[in-house]
Amino acid sequence: MKEMIAKKIKYILDILDENLNQNKISFSSENAFVFHFAWQLFKEYESFIDSVDFEVSLFEGFSDGKFIDLLVCFKNNNQITKVGFEFKFPKKENKGGTDARRSIINDIKRLTWLVKNNEIDIGVFICATDDDYFIKEDGKRVALEFVTHHEKFFKQGHNLPTDKKYSEPVKSLIDITFNWNHLVKEKNEFNIEQGKYSFLEPIFVL
């Protein structure tokens, strides 16, 4: 069931990636990204979906907010699998990259906490950006631990980064690798292809 769900999620992201980068759709905000994903998922797989809900309150006494971006309950015969999603859509024009990188890592911590506490069965972190800041290996402007660059790796069983704002210690349940697409390598560093949004390979917390 979990493998089937992962394939369906990747397929939907491939559709959104193609449509966004061919200017067939546009996302004005992170909320628009969430909506387009949920709508496309339901359109393609209505028969496998029991419910879809936005901004669900699942956190009590953890992290910096009570709500998860999206909760989808998949059904297979009598089995229900609860999948929680966190999204990020940092755009070049919005700046604030330092806080956004911290927030990306914290979203993964939040999903990990929910899976660990049996609030959801699968956590999925989804992200797309047109800002090279998130792709490059650069520690000057943000604490070295809070990085999201291409091929960045966090090992299963090790604590995910903490700081004063995001102080909760959370051990990763999985090996995490940040793999971004639509990249070109220039002068030994990665950049996003001109005019494109780079999509992160979805991170599944199980």
Image (cartoon, rainbow, N blue to C red):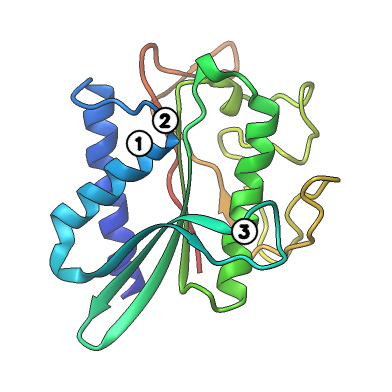
Q: Residue at x 23, y 53 (%)?
A: 41
Q: Along the line of sight, which residue is nearer the eye, 95 or 148?
A: 95
Q: Which residue is mark 1?
A: 32
Q: Residues within 10 Å of mark 2 (few under 14, many from 20)?
A: few
Instruction: List x then y, in percent, for residue 59.
Output: 61, 65
Q: CA distance from mark 1 to mark 3?
A: 21 Å
Instruction: List x then y, in percent, for residue 116.
Output: 61, 74
Left or right, residue 179 beside residue 136: left
Q: Earlier in the sequence, mark 2 or mark 3?
A: 2
Q: Residue at x 66, y 49 (%)?
A: 106
Asked if residue 186 is positioned above or below residue 162 in the image, the reply reads above
Circle 1/circle 2 CB separation < 8 Å: yes
Nearest to the eye among marks 1 and 3: give it.
1
Quadrant of residue 58 within the rendered picture? bottom right
Instruction: Inspect the image, locate mark 2, and give the three-letter code of the amino acid beneath it.
Output: Ser
Asked if residue 54 is positioned above or below residue 60 in the image, the reply reads above
Q: Which residue is mark 3?
A: 110
Left or right, residue 198 beside residue 8: right
